[in-house]
Image (cartoon, rainbow, N blue to C red):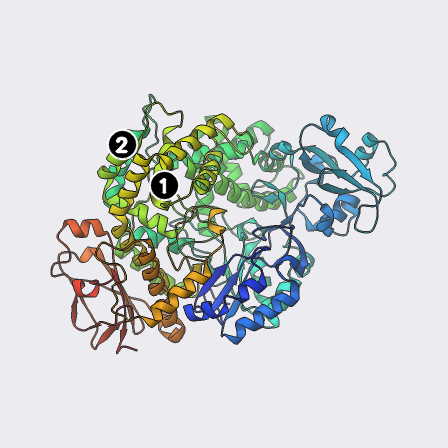
Amino acid sequence: MAAGRAPGAPGSTYRLQLTPEFGFEQAAEQVDYLADLGVTHVYLSPVLDAVPGSMHGYDVTNHARIRGELGGEEGFRALAKRFRSHGLGIILDIVPNHMAVPADMSLNRQLWSVLRDGRDSPYATWFDIDWAAQDDRMLLPVLGGSLESCLADLWVQPSGGPDGEPVLRYFDHVLPLWPGTARLPMRGLLESQHYRLSWWQDAATELNWRRFFDIATLIGIRVEDPAVFDATHQVIVGLVTEGLVDGLRVDHPDGLADPRGYLDRLSSATGGAWTVVEKILAADEVLPSDWACAGTTGYDALRVVDGLFLDPAGGEPLSAEYARLCRSADDDYPAKRFADVATPAKREIANGSLAAEVTRLTRLLAPLSPDVTEDDARTVLTEVLAAFPVYRAYVHPGEFPAEAAKAEVWRAVEGARRALPKRLRGLAADLGAAALGRLRPVGGAAGRVGEFAVRFQQTTGPVEAKGVEDTACYRWCRLISLNEVGCDPDRFGVTPDEFHAVAGRLAADWPATMTTLSTHDTKRQEDVRARLAVLAEIPQEWGKQVRQWHEEGTAVDPDTEYLLWQTVVGAWPISGDRLAGYLTKAVREAKRRTSWVKPDQEYEAEVLALAARALDDPEIAGSIASFVAEIAGDAVVNSLGAKLVQLTMPGVPDVYQGCETAALSLVDPDNRREVDFTRICHDLAALDASSPDANLLGDAGGDLDSFSRAKLLVTSRALRLRRARPEWFAGGYEPLAATGPAAGHAVAFRRGQALTVATRLPVGLRRRGGWQDTALPLPAGDWADLLTGTVHRGAAAMTALTGRLPVALLVQGGE
């Protein structure tokens, strides 16, 4: 399959998060609404057996069975049939990189076998286990303390296993026993097993198996082994070949040993079904052209669409306001650049929660160069990982590295060399050669070169994700709408020309890629980010407002306080419980004063007390509400513009559940709350019954309910158009340019016989006196706005195009 080309690509998708409370039956109940909304495919979170009670499904326990808690195979088939009857297909989210390490190990029968039989298990090759690192045993860091302190809580249950065999119990943990060892004294019994129990915090430093990021309840599987691929994909492939599933979303391909090889095998097995990959691309990075997929899951589109509605001129003044509030006795704080926070954070992760992975790489690297100590190898590895510019370089041992892979590796090497003492700079170069599979090994270490190249690639991504997304993004808070998956907070804004260039490349190279503005993993939903983007146009006013809310003498550090005020404004109105849950996660992810590993209850109480004061103090809460009301109209302009652009630009647009209306949730689990489909369905029916010239927003930009209805109108009309006229959106893309004094505040483009028009930077537009005589020259003919019913022709005045809504969706001839 050629890059970006995929037979049967969806017209659009709608993401549903399945849970035990919202399973196949409940999803099927939304079929009428989803069909009315205009989507062509429903995009489901993972459906295979998972840990009981799982709210996400990424902790797969059994690849051979559809999850019973969701409704099982019978329920899934009924769901697919119901969807088909309404013209809706299904896209499935699949998890090839890892499986669950459940408390009851018998739920994962392959892992159970490996724990019981060790290397002799027929499933020993399923998992990425470094047996030599723990004397042929697998480390299980599940204890609440040292082994000695937990002995009294370990006991043998005579017939607790899946086949009635004896098992070892530790609270909720159920572990297999090597046959014949159940009657041994506890110490002897433990020494006789193919696993070693240890304190849960030992996972960071001693773990000898690959996991998902730093999560020791998810174990990496070797899907590069054809037998493992076949066993773990049999059900998924069967659903595709049977016609029940139309396409796939591949979770975390960067964790795989060979993403390209995996996608080739998947494409072959599914007959080239439409497939997108959860690949996080840096701003200047492109998806490998030799991947058998239609594109990414859309974080790259999110970055440029958000940037289009962010004023580049606001970067410097917002930096000044950020520094004014957060400045301390240290003149270098806060850092002037996000990169200056991200690199140390990545270094901390490599030395901290991912130290075990670095240790494994160190053991592979040291023998590849003469006279290298493990300490030196570790130092160099840490610096190269901290300097790595992307999630992963795609190197295939035995092949000559691609130019992009070489460039990324050597950028990291050069970054590390600047931070290393002179005596270790040569070793950094050796590491780069080893990462590219090009280092001549010493002695009998030939086999380690290929292994090092693979393992190194599987480590750069976790260091990047945990260091940047889950640490630095909570530490550097100039404008938190930029602290998003796939974004670069140092890049402030995207010009229309830059956006058009990206959209044109997508149309040419990846026309069936996915686009999105919100996912189950975004740090905050799209309308939170759109509201915060207004701050870039009013930096001084924002700074003055924050200084009024600031409480002198608070024990909360300035960055966290600044994060709090932005969060409250962006997500307003927000409950105390939601805000407390978010802030607890944020300060623990930041890992400055507290963390998941070592929570500081006293400090966290100070943060939550400040949050409570923000919501409960009538004066402060009233001031926040007034400020949000003042910027609400401008936020609506940003939100509706971003939504229409995302829905009509090149690619397959995805709508995350509920985001067809006001999307003001924060990071998970906040963004996985129940969606009020009954209300949304009612609002859509009311819109369909109303006159197209109804004033949805009112004179002041509308309240939250009015905005939700306006967004629902924009979303439904764009999706319905794409469904009715798929040929218009299949490939071509033509930028359109406005003329006149405010032309820079308009963005417009043509897809077939449809035109998208949006307003950008509304504060600046208002301050310059509005559109004045700015116009958009339209192609010949009559062009009817599907949102308002207004017909335009010739050089249409922007005041007329955006008079009722700040966006327009024009169709030639009023089709």
Confirm or deny contact between disc 2 and disc 1 (CB under 8 A).
no
Amino acid under label 2?
A: Gln
Dot 2 or dot 1: first in sequence order is 2
Q: Where is residue 255 in the image (x, y as percent from the top left)?
A: 56, 49
Among the 4 quarters of the image, the one containing residue 582 = top left
Left or right of 312 in this view: 50: right
Q: In which quarter of the image is the C terminus?
A: bottom left
330 or 618, which lies in front? 618
Q: Position of residue 383 (x, y in %)?
A: 48, 33
Q: Where is residue 447 in the image (x, y as percent from the top left)?
A: 65, 44
User: Residue under circle 2?
Assistant: 548
594 or 197, which lies in front? 594
Task: Identify the element where label 2 is drawn.
Answer: helix
Among the 4 quarters of the image, the one containing residue 130 = top right
Q: Where is residue 700 in the image (x, y as percent from the top left)?
A: 22, 54
Amino acid under label 1?
A: Val
User: Residue under circle 1?
Assistant: 568
454 or 422, which lies in front? 454
Above or below residue 350? Residue 57 is below
Q: Residues within 10 Å of mark 2 (few under 14, many from 20)?
A: few
